Amino acid sequence: MRNYQPYKYCPLVANSIRLLGLNDTDGSLDTLKTVHVDEAPPYFALSYSWGKQTQDVRMVVDDQAMSVSPSMAEAIQRLRNLAVDSSASNTRVKWVWVWIDKICINQDDASERSEQVQLMSSIYSQAIRTLIWLGPDFDGCSAAWGLVDQIYGVFLRENPCAEFTTDIPMQMYSDRYHEESSLPAWHDILWQHLRMLFELLWFTRIWVIQEVALSPKDPILLHGKRTYPWYRLAWVSSWLLRNGYLRLAQMPNRMQNVDTIANIRRSRSRWRLDALLFIASTRYQATDQRDKVYALLGLAAETQEPTQVPNELRPDYSQKVTEVYTKAALFLLREYKSLSFLARPNGVPSNIPLTQQKYQPQLLPSWAPNWYDSPIVERDLSWSLSWISDPGVARQVAVALGFPEHYTASAGLPAKLLDSPNQSVLRLSGLKAGTIVSATQFDDKMWSFRRASQSPPLLQLWKIALRSWPERRTLLDLIASWVKATTVDQQRLSGRTADQILKDGSAYLYNLLSNTEDRQTYTINDQDVIGLLRNLSIGGNADIYAALASNFCLNRKLIVTSEGSLGIGPMGAKVGDLVFVIFGGEVPYILRAWGTLFRFVGQSYIDGLMSGEAIHMREQGELEEEIIELR
């Protein structure tokens, strides 16, 4: 066998890229061609997962040797076949030009990597289309594509005119509806194949978001010898999400990742970086944790003009991960004067999963977003109090991260970012609105309506609320506050009005309390809680309340403040922590005193502080504005 010298890359000039030319008959004639990104011949862009395979397969390029993984070698062979595959190319050609980051970028040159990342948007948007290589079909899970076709048929029958995910009516999953849809029963092996299919690493890779979203034509999935159109898988994932399937343990959680990409691809507007980071950071993973930011820049509205990219957002692989995250966070705060991007902060040490310790997240300030790879699947995360604007609306305004319209804790006042000599110390202005006097974790399994009568943890929480409730306020106020706090006033997500969700929550509490003999759980100031709940619950549906409350109370604590207000807060919250309304944040925040500074614990929902009450108290002279230094 001939001995080839290792491939030696020549430096790239500005705005140029390399394309791999695959010869249709002889692999030894493959070549790398350098072209200006705007003058490239027609080419395909490959999306794939690097994986952890050894690079032990030799390929010859320009009479030099490169080493690739076995999966990549098979992908290249599939791409070579495109030269004679009429489904991807209308005429036979001698060469197929493709862009593959692993080969077309010198991965040993950090400067080149940084420069090429800034061209990713052009590379993928100017290709013929993105080809998605899922890998060889070793385990036979390609049978899952038959199930995907069945689900797509149901989607198309029910939603023939759908353009956006929101065109699919949202509903809770029900066994009856599943049976009526004619989909296979849960014991059918096809569901196992579907779970196996979504174990493929491609579905977790953060780079695939832009690689698919920017494809001019519908991407094509290549799985072993099978090809499949992206749009079908995208609509199937959206239909399953809107019909409650993706909250089920038997469904692959990674299908939410497909729906995420589909929403971005269908959107008529650009997405701001804060919205992209919010929707992607917990769902996708990266080999290099700096790419949790860099992989989204090709899509971000802030970076679409190459000559006007903010310095804080220019890819630089010489920077540490903590620098990349902190700079991006400070940019978002200065640019938009909003704290909505602090939806998942690094927080206090008890917030950080043990499996993230290898990334040393403790080096991040407590206020900085924790965008590291998360070991927690989406269905096990509590729903955030920050909110993404509707991506389906046709308008020039970019899709952004913010808060629900009815959350106005700081009355719309912008953040006051004060100068700080230390980048890790964030100096803001706000109002101290209370102290936590009780913080008790919700039992994640307590919300099933069928278990309500056997739910001592929830009864304990109800007792805490009863004991803490101010005498000056009525029993009806307590019940209403409980329902608002546990559903964070988001009844519209369940298609309910405020009056309806009060009935639903009352039905749940009535079922809970009427099955206990402990009189302390259903009396307050000699008032009969049971009788009131019985009347309030007429026409209520306990299951609807439980489904909504469980999503927001998951991995959170019931909080009682020194003013007697009820709310929910982060798992890291504890007695003695402080409740602040910080300008630029439309929800209250939990902070912890730390010497002369504060630690940032996280977002909260506190009934009685959600509609600008703290700002009104400042105007009345009851609260004073403070400078808050967060580290």
Image (cartoon, rainbow, N blue to C red):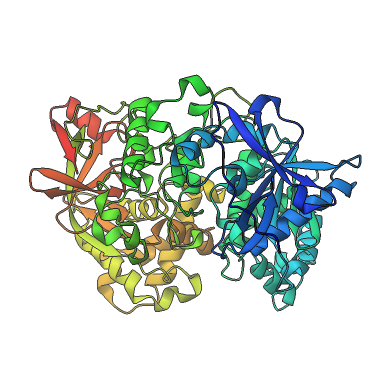
Does residue 232 appear in the picture of this structure? no
Q: Position of residue 290 (x, y in %)?
A: 42, 46
Q: Residue at x 57, y 56 (%)?
A: 50
**Above or below for 522 versus 492:** below
Q: Position of residue 478 (x, y in %)?
A: 30, 54
Quarter holding the N terminus is bottom right
Residue most toward the left? 595
Does residue 56 appear in the picture of this structure? yes
**Viewer-closest of 9 and 401:** 9
Residue most toward the top? 307
User: Viewed as shown, does residue 407 lie left or right of 130?
Assistant: left
User: Viewed as shown, does residue 275 lie left or right of 42?
Assistant: left
Q: Residue at x 85, y 46 (%)?
A: 83
User: Viewed as shown, does residue 109 lie left or right of 419?
Assistant: right
Q: Position of residue 356 (x, y in %)?
A: 36, 61
Q: How many numbered tags mark residues here? A: 0
**Viewer-closest of 565 and 235:** 235
